[in-house]
Image: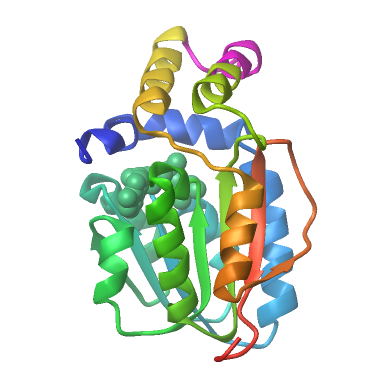
Amino acid sequence: MRENSVELFSKNWSIYQKIIAHNYMFHHDLGKITTTVWEDNFKNTSVNVLDLGCGDAYQLSTIMDGRQISSYTGIDLSSAVLEYTKQNLANINIPFSLLAGPMEMEIDKITNTYNLIYSSYAFHHLQDEEKLELLKKCYAKLDAGGVLILIDHFKEDGQDRDDYIDEYVDNIKTNWLHITSEENDLIEEHMRGYDFPTTEQQIIKWGEGIGFVLETVPHVDRCHKLLVLKKYTETN
Ligand SMILES: C[S@@+](CC[C@H](N)C(=O)[O-])C[C@H]1O[C@@H](n2cnc3c(N)ncnc32)[C@H](O)[C@@H]1O
């Protein structure tokens, strides 16, 4: 069941690359914000990066290229996709390690701590209780001054999951003009089976309850968002 959840990515990675290339999920805009957050927090700092649900790490590797990176650890459920990740990271010549498996469990095997934890469009694959537990684990793995950048698509407050997915799928059909109807069907099937988005407010409430402080960043879209959750001290 869990392996099926990544079939869209492992067998059809080209669809996701097309989505990125056409900026349908605002990767370009979110990348610019990520770069600004990086500059604001780590200008002269060498960064230990943990990337949860890293996929091929294409987007983040373009941001990491030329920056000071002490280490990069990527976790993804799909070992097939991690073959692309290796190539993208080798191209930017940084020290990296990759773990294949569920991020919510693999993270327990890591003994390092990080100043940046990044997760882009992966949290929505978890059930709500798993999202909360993973947020707690992220907090524990961050150094004081460390930042969690969480990119995802989010439901509206009070919106039902089926209504949200209906609306998302309608938007794809109307606006994602380079996606064929077969690709559309694959995306829809994947979303209906494996996407469990929560609300932005819920993530913030959980995060603040754990001790994170929400930093303000620009919004790019009503449902595709980047949240910056910062850990200020070891004890807060
Ligand atoms: C939409 S892709 C995002 C890839 C990349 N982070 C990006 O933003 O371009 C979602 C990724 O999350 C991975 N994934 C889904 N559920 C996961 C889980 N429980 N643990 C680890 N990875 C997971 C999938 O294999 C896929 O590579």
Residue 93 can be seen, yes or no: no
Q: Position of residue 214 (x, y in %)?
A: 70, 67
In this view, 195 is above or below 96: above
Magenta span contains residue 183: no
Relative placement, left or right, of 87 versus 229 is: left
Q: Where is residue 138 in the image (x, y as percent from the top left)?
A: 45, 71
In this view, 161 is above or below 167: below
- At horizontal 66% and vertical 50% (from top left) the residue drawn is 201
Q: Where is residue 167 in the image (x, y as percent from the top left)?
A: 60, 19
Q: Nearer the viewer, residue 221 or 132?
A: 132
For the image shown, how many numbered marks are present on the structure? Answer: 0
Residue 158 can be seen, yes or no: yes
- At horizontal 39% and vertical 43% (from top left) the residue drawn is 125
In this view, 190 is above or below 62: above
Quarter of the image holding residue 212? bottom right
Quarter of the image holding residue 76? bottom left
In this view, 36 is above or below 139: above
- At horizontal 64% and vertical 58% (from top left) the residue drawn is 204
- At horizontal 62% and vertical 30% (from top left) the residue drawn is 24
Q: Give the range drawn in magenta.
A: 169-180
Q: Which of 47 and 194 is in front in this view?
A: 194
Quarter of the image holding residue 71? bottom left
Magenta span contains residue 176: yes
User: In the rendered image, which quarter contains the N terminus?
Assistant: top left
